[in-house]
Image (cartoon, grey):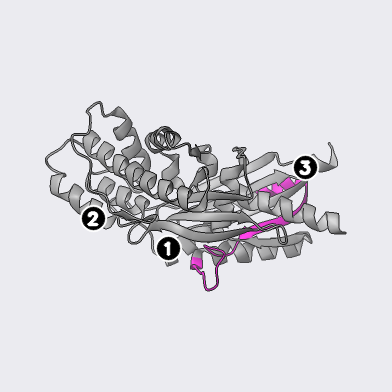
Amino acid sequence: MSFQENNIIIGIDTSCYTTSIAAISLGKNVIFNKKIMLEVKKDSKGLRQSEAVFQHVKNLGAIQEEIKEIIKNYEIVAICVSNKPRPIENSYMPVFTVGHNFAKLCSTMMKCELYETTHQENHIEASLFTNNIKNKESFLSVHMSGGTTEILLCKSNKNDLNYSVEIVGGSKDISFGQLIDRVGVKMGYRFPAGKYVDESAINCTKKIEQGLKTSVKEGYMNLSGLENQINKILNEKDEEYICKLILDSVVRNMVKSIIYLSEKHNIDEVVFAGGVSASKYISKELILKLKKYKINAYFTDPEYCTDNGVGCALIGVNKFENKSSKN
């Protein structure tokens, strides 16, 4: 086995709903990609941070046997972990301290390098993994998840290999993920409801009579009003139609925001990340609608757009190679 394939980087991410560990070779081949969804009780709309922290500790203990098998066949040269939600000052969430402390312990015991990144940068890197965009120097990245709806202006920062990330749009209240989950749970779907809502929307053969009213201004959206509109007709329409109506509103809000921001920043490429972007309905509609405005939309495989450790591992590979070249 070559040096590039024998030496690997471990990526760790402990988000609000997923324990993720991945391993990438220096040749950027995925060796290992393990994700354990945190358990949410039926009819519940989410987890408290304390509940999530407990489950992450439990899950990391369960994964250690599989990590032990990796060590037998490969040389772990570094670990990269997301230690907070965003690359900004005072960004903090208890769940990320679990993965961070686990990574610090492992790096000490394995005597390997420890690199730190953020959950948001992890998503950006993972979304680029299978997409060959034309201009990595400047592009838009959309993070649509259970807790976040943000549109980011990303510019490469060659000095430290990180991207300069600026929030230029997104939701001013609830996220797309919260909207979908809240309505989905009301219709009897299990939390998180995204995949069930997506399947129902795709199966709906009815044309939308009248879309929900959107509130978009200069790249920013107000989404709580959409939930109120849905609640008023929840018992008047069938489930599949309601699901299609919700996802259609996601698409129309996002299209309006992306068009404005693309023109403002002179950018024609946007990559999508986060669990909501795994929706087949949303990805198909956004690609088609944005193409009319000569904007290229990039989506990646569900295993990379949902919470994962692959992005962390890729960032680790870049940092390791940069340090090695300097030495």
Give the position of the N terminus as an image quadrant.
top right
Q: Residue furthest left?
A: 236
Q: 159 or 29: which is nearer to us?
A: 159
Q: Residues within 10 Å of mark 1 (few under 14, many from 20)?
A: some
Answer yes or no: is residue 21 visible.
no
Q: Residue furthest bottom?
A: 90
Examine the rendering and report whether any part of residue 178 can be seen. yes
The tag earlier along the polypeptide, 2 or 3, is: 3
Gap between marks 2 and 1 measured at Cα: 30 Å
Q: Which residue is mark 1?
A: 51
Q: Is residue 282 left or right of residue 161?
A: left
Which contiguous range is marked in magenta? 67-94
Residue position for label 3: 73
Q: Which mark is residue 225?
A: 2
Q: Secondary structure at mark 2?
A: helix
Rendered location of residue 303, percent (x, y): 53, 40
